Image (spheres, helix red, strand yellow):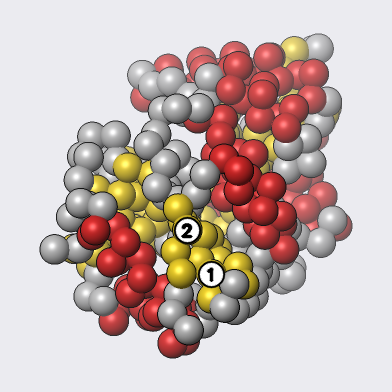
Amino acid sequence: MAIKIVPYEPKYQEVWDLFCYSAQNATFLHSRKFINYHGDRFKDESLLFYKENKLLGLLPAAQSLTKPDQVISHPGITYGGVIHEGGITGEVMLEVFSALIKHYKTKGYSLFQYKAIPFIYPMKPSQDDLYALFRFRALIRRCDLSCALDLSRPKSLSNRRMRGVKKASRSIVISGDPSLLPNLYKVIQGNLDRKYGALPVHSFLELTELTQKFPNEIQLRCAIFENKVEAGVIFFNSKNVWHAQYIAASKVGYQLSALDAVFDASMEEARSLGARYFDFGTSNEDQGITLNSGLYTFKSEFGGSGVSHEFYELNLT
């Protein structure tokens, strides 16, 4: 029996989120509970895949905000892709891609951008989609470089990071108190403005809403000096990975090497709670073309190494 495609509607939210919870390659970013925080910003083009009346998988997707003839998986999240419980592999994945290509082409789209899930996030190997992309002649149009630490191996901090940890540990206290979010957000704002003249991706209200919805997944770790938050990290965590979504320090925090201590303590915590990887995030600008080598070096000195975030484009015409 052929793959049946059902376009997402709000009535499928519960079914969608229950499936995400058990899928081998989903994170909370793929849940409707997370995606819906965008409200009506995107025209949703998400799909549910059925075969013989059984739900096999999901695809979070939406229309591009700047190019209405393009559909992206998904413009509002870091990475998308076909979500499944292990039932979409090999030939079935090829069938799924054939069906979704036909669906989007029929809807008038000319290009499909696929934001592949980095290999560290799935609980099991899940890259049949990359083979399908090759078979359907997709092209890599962007690649961001993240830096991640394998927590199953002994950590190997550089001498510089070890000195930083010792220095910071003499003067700061590390706290995960969620009530410190407003203080840490101000540090994040100041850091982004000072370095890049930029704003956080999430507004304070959005981040507050998300932390309330996902208290176990979205957590913060702050460095406090003289009763003031001077540095910290906001983590977006999944079953397999602790991911540093926001990293920031004030001028005082940098002088104290506060982030060194925050990361060292957080890596140990992630390891003790059973995470496999610790992801420091990407270090790119200009759609992946420019690598911030100083930032990448800082992350790699905690023992991390490269993980690619690949963006594919599939011509539907």
Give coordinates of residue 94: x percent, y percent: 39, 80
Q: Residue at coordinates 67% horizontally, 24% vertically from top-left? A: 209
The answer to whether residue 252 is left or right of residue 116 is: right
Question: Toward which corner of the image does residue 217 lie, by quadrant?
Answer: top right
Question: Toward which corner of the image does residue 149 lie, by quadrant?
Answer: bottom right
Q: Mark 1 points at which residue?
A: 50
The answer to whether residue 110 is left or right of residue 41 is: left
Q: Is residue 98 visible?
A: yes
Give coordinates of residue 223: x percent, y percent: 74, 27
Give coordinates of residue 168: x percent, y percent: 74, 32
Eyeballing the image, is 64 above or below 212? below
Q: Residue at coordinates 69% horizontally, 47% vertically from top-left? A: 14
| Disc 2 element | strand
The outermost residue toward the left is 317
The answer to whether residue 123 is left or right of residue 90 is: right
- Going from N to C along the chain, the mark reached first, 2 or 1, is 2
Q: What residue type is labelled 2?
A: Val
| Disc 1 element | strand
Question: Toward which corner of the image does residue 145 lie, by quadrant?
Answer: bottom left
Q: Mark 2 points at which residue?
A: 6
Eyeballing the image, is 82 above or below 230? below
